[in-house]
Image: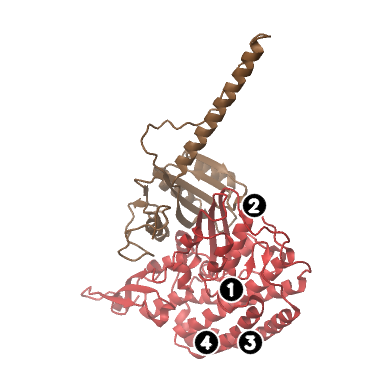
Amino acid sequence: MSAFAQSQTNETFVLNLGPQHPATHGVLRVKLVMDGEYVVEAEPVLGYIHRMHEKMGENRTWAQFLPNTGRMDYLHALAFNHGYVTAVERAAGIEVAERAEYIRVITNELNRISSHLLWFGAFVLDLGGFSPLLYAFDDREHILDLLESVTGSRLTYCYYRFGGVYNDIDDGFLAGTTAFIKRLRDRMPMYHNLVTKNIIMMKRLEGIGPVSAEMCRKYGATGPVARGSGIDFDLRKHEPYSVYSEFDFEVPVYTECDSMARYMVRMDEIEQSMRIIEQAVAKLPDGPFMTPKVSKIVKPPKGDYYNAVETARGSFGIRLVSDGTNTPYRLKLRSPTFSNLSLFGEASRGMLLPDALALMGSLDLVIPEIDR
Amino acid sequence: MKLAAIKQALAAISPLAIEQTEYAGKGFVLDVKVAADQVVEAAIVLDKEDFFIEAVTGVDWLGEKEALKKEAEKQAAAAAAAKAKAAAEAAEAAGEEAPAAPAPAPAPASVPSEDVAPLIDDLEVVYDFNRYDQLCRVVIRTRVPRDNPEVPTISKVYPGANWHERETHDFFGIKFIGHPDLSPLLLPEDADYHPLLKDFTV
């Protein structure tokens, strides 16, 4: 750290970042104690869009909570759908139709790509590069159109049901998906040429914002944040749910622990998601998209259950407690970014403000998912 | 690290109960009940074994003891009725034969030994831990009385527990002793209510 980090007078001031600031991507406030351009202490202030989804869960039936799950992580809503339905399916012992599992994987991975693309655009925007955002949104638009054609919505999906999915996919969707994968494959080298190998980008990210593996463990960081710190942890491989064990894909892991590593993890994940989708489309079995005769009224047996899935940002866990009735007794939603953001205070200490913002961007924050 | 070794390490702090659960049905492999003052010890054990903290949360068991008491009373009444019936039958039979075998003793219903004092229900604090290298979800849980919910903080072992505990304090009013800052995290800064308590009404 340069000599500027420690001013002679030890004079600090408080800088308020947000809750309405372009770099915080939503209503997040960070209280910064600054020493000149350097961050002495950073304290995220949460709760601006806290909606108490957990209490809402206790006031409606198991099925009625489904739309809520799409409204937490609005960028990867299907993964939250998936986490909730698999949790209830585990608790109530509901079988899922095989075709539905494949449909879930295809749509979920498409959604993951769209989430990463938006993050990519917004992250580069944070760093001062405007045009990549437009390219990313162009590609993302195709995914939104595809998902809209089967789910009926463009952002806050509510597509999965206990035992299957709401609607079957058709040949048009599959053809569109295949065409999109081809298109994105062709465009990925362009992204890398435009952005990844850009010298300004590299200077802004390489060696900046170190998050050690030990820090990840102490704060419970998951997802690309952990994988950028050399931790090979992806629930799709580590705790295979749905039919993820059927597919051949890799978990990108980078050991540099810097913002660039987290960037690279997500870019590589887009490629891996495309691989998964291709295999799932090729293997898609015929059959019903919903297990026949799943009771409309779900009543999981008394007890508590835990279930977690891998979202674009890390592991989303649900701890549900059932008292054997048709409403949840307790529904704990463990969102990944909540834990990932909690290490920001420690990780950003002593950093230059613009670097701290790059670090914050590389954590991929989705505020409604933190606040729930 | 084998599950057995972790179980042994946790058993060393002499928890109230330690149970291996079936992963497929439950989603976790080890369910450990500890006393409130043992949570820090348990966290230290798991920290040494390279676990990461997944979440901390609470569950309000309002009305549980009342329900258990009623259930126990019901069982006791049923047992007494069965005993009386058996005795009557035995008396009838005794007219002809030697006394029949004594009626089966009533099930040792866990009749609460409390006096008339109102039952204080529990708040449960649940800690979820997991590992990066292998599938091994461990649940640590402890119970504290609703009228004085106090648990020592584990945020000194796992700094990541800081926010989770703050959130649990927001929602349930559980006080984490030694926590650096229990001011509301997700609720408004002047919030003096705890919405996930079962007797909370808007």
Distance in Å between CA atoms under marks 2 and 3: 41 Å
| A295 on left or right of B168 | right
Q: Name the residue under label 2.
A: B24
**Which amino acid does the dot numbered 2 rest on?**
Ala
Distance in Å between CA atoms under marks 4 and 1: 23 Å
For residue A247, above or below residue B69? below
Can residue B26 be seen at all in this image of the molecule? yes
Q: Do labels 3 and 4 share a chain?
A: yes
Chain A: colour as depicted:
red
Query: Where is residue A162, by image quadrant?
Result: bottom right
Distance in Å between CA atoms under marks 3 and 1: 26 Å
- Chain in brown, by letter, is B
Q: Mark 3 lies on which chain?
A: A
Identity of the residue furthest to the bottom in this view: A131
Q: Which chain carries label 4?
A: A
Point out the frontmost of discs 3 and 4. Answer: 4
For residue A258, above or below residue A309? below
**Which amino acid does the dot numbered 1 rest on?**
Tyr
Task: Say which mark, if any, is on residue A187.
Answer: 3
Report x, y in % for residue A260: 50, 77
Q: Mark 1 points at which residue?
A: A157
Taking the spot 64% from the left edge, 18% from the top edge, the residue there is B89
Q: State the SS at label 3.
A: helix
Point out the frontmost of discs 3 and 1. Answer: 1
Q: Are marks 2 and 4 in contact (CB under 8 Å)?
A: no
Q: Do the residues labelled 2 and 3 touch (CB within 8 Å)?
A: no
Q: State the SS at label 4.
A: helix
Query: Where is residue A177, by image quadrant?
Result: bottom right
Report x, y in % for residue A49: 42, 71
Taking the spot 45% from the left edge, 68% from the top edge, the residue there is A370
